[in-house]
């Protein structure tokens, strides 16, 4: 139980997307059944206080979730926190072994977008163009996490799309993972000789791998992995997570509710055009005021009072994301697609009118 004042930090993530490749774009990959996602558990079990919310967001009143956007997501996976580990004791990072967006805390003097860019370069071993026109990020949302170890993060979530970022369109995943493996080998040698433990933190940070591997996941798989992190039964996402949990004695997965919510928000956009239009009208300052529910320096009693007040449907609605149910999400997707179709039809009509006047 927390005894000191709450710390509220600013953090940023970048969600890299591309159009689905190969079989991932087929219709068989867009549907996710309630049975598969819950593993046969009772629908409202798992996820602690987010049990009902995750079911409403993904399934609503249906037994099947439809994920219609056709986006793939670039995600990274790792387990051990080498900066907090010691020679005597291994420490796991938060959300160990989960498929995560690149991201981290905003450093002093940085904007959230600058932090998102830096974290993407550091964690995924990418070299981004210096020219801002060649490296386009769109603000998707701002969310505040529940306190963990008396720290709450205000998360600025950005999206980078391959179709307008050549560096992402041309990304060689094999080369990235090979570079990560090489860094891992160098680090392992330093650990085995003992020299790693004598380094200063800044030197450790330069040597220690933050990510084991990166991979493009289709939207269905990414949402499924986030959803199952909140099930009562611990089912690892792959053999690497299973083996690391056994090695480090980790009994269960960390809940990936906000990651799942962000994935579903990305899925509600039928195109980059609709996502960019939404981002352009989003005012960061207004959005921050709307979503922030915990303040830096709050005492435990004040945090508890806010939790109790925010349990009401009225307060929850004030801070809600783009939608609260699968039905709302489908309606938002349909509206955005209809608006795009109407805009396209209008452009065709205008073009035809101009030609007729020639």
Image: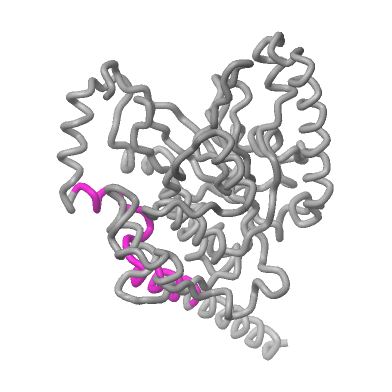
Which residue of the protein is positioned furthest toward the bottom in this rendering? 356
Q: Position of residue 164 (x, y in %)?
A: 71, 56
Taking the image as shown, residue 192 lies to the left or right of residue 324, namely: right
Q: Is residue 318 magenta?
A: yes
Q: Position of residue 192 (x, y in %)?
A: 76, 21
Q: Judge from the rendering whether residue 274 lies leftward or rightward of residue 354; answer left or right.
A: left
Is 128 placed above or below 218 here?
above
Residue 33, compared with residue 207, is above or below; it is: below
Is 176 magenta? The answer is no
Q: Position of residue 255 (x, y in %)?
A: 42, 46
Total numbered badges shown on the rendered structure: 0
Which residue corresponds to the image point at 71% horizontal and 69% vertical from the top-left? 21
Q: Which residues are magenta?
A: 315-337
Q: Nearer the viewer, residue 190 or 123?
A: 190
Q: What is the chief secondary structure element of the magenta stretch?
A: helix
- Residue at 71 percent of width and 36 percent of height: 121
Q: Residue at x 22, y 23 (%)?
A: 300
Residue 7: give x, y in percent of width and height.
Answer: 37, 22
Q: Is any part of residue 109 visible from this angle?
A: no
Residue 172, above or below 211: below
Q: Quadrant of the N terminus?
A: top left
Q: How is the image coloured?
A: one colour
Q: Residue at x 38, y 73 (%)?
A: 331
Q: Is residue 109 left or right of residue 46?
A: right
When asked about the image quadrant of residue 291, the answer is top left
In this rendering, position of residue 188 left or right of residue 140: right
- Residue 5, compared with residue 99, is above or below; it is above
Whether residue 86 is visible here, answered yes or no, is: yes
Assign the C terminus to one quadrant of the image.
bottom right
Quadrant housing residue 79: top right
């Amino acid at each position: 139980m927390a005894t000191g004042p709450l710390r509220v930090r600013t953090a940023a993530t970048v969600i890299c997307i591309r159009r689905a490749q190969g079989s991932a774009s087929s219709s068989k990959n867009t549907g996710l059944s309630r049975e598969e996602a819950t593993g046969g558990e009772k629908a409202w079990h798992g996820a602690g206080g987010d049990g009902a919310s995750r079911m409403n967001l993904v399934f609503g009143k249906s037994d099947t979730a439809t994920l219609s956007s056709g986006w793939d997501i670039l995600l990274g996976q790792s387990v051990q926190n080498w900066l907090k580990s010691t020679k005597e004791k291994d420490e796991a990072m938060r959300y160990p072994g989960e498929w995560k967006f690149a991201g981290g805390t905003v450093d002093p003097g940085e904007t959230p977008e600058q932090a998102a860019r830096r974290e993407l370069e550091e964690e995924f071993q990418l070299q981004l163009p210096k020219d801002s026109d060649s490296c386009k990020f769109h603000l998707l949302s701002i969310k505040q996490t529940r306190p963990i170890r008396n720290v709450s993060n205000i998360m600025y979530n950005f999206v980078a799309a391959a179709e307008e970022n050549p560096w992402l369109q041309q990304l060689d995943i094999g080369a990235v993972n090979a570079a990560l493996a090489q860094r891992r080998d160098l680090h392992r040698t330093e650990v085995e000789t003992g020299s790693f433990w004598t380094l200063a933190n800044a030197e450790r940070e330069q040597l220690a791998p933050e990510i084991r591997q990166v991979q493009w996941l289709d939207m269905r798989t990414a949402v499924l992995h986030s959803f199952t992190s909140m099930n009562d039964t611990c089912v690892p996402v792959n053999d690497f997570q299973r083996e690391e949990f056994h090695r480090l004695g980790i009994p269960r997965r960390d809940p990936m509710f906000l990651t799942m919510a962000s994935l579903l928000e990305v899925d509600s956009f039928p195109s980059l055009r609709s996502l960019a239009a939404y981002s352009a009208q989003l005012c960061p300052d207004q959005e921050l005021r709307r979503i922030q529910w915990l303040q830096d320096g709050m005492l435990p009693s004040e945090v508890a009072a806010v939790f109790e007040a925010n349990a009401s449907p009225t307060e929850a609605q004030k801070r809600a994301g783009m939608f609260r149910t699968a039905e709302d999400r489908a309606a938002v997707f349909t509206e955005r697609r209809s608006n795009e179709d109407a805009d396209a039809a209008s452009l065709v009509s205008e073009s035809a009118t101009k030609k007729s006047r020639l």
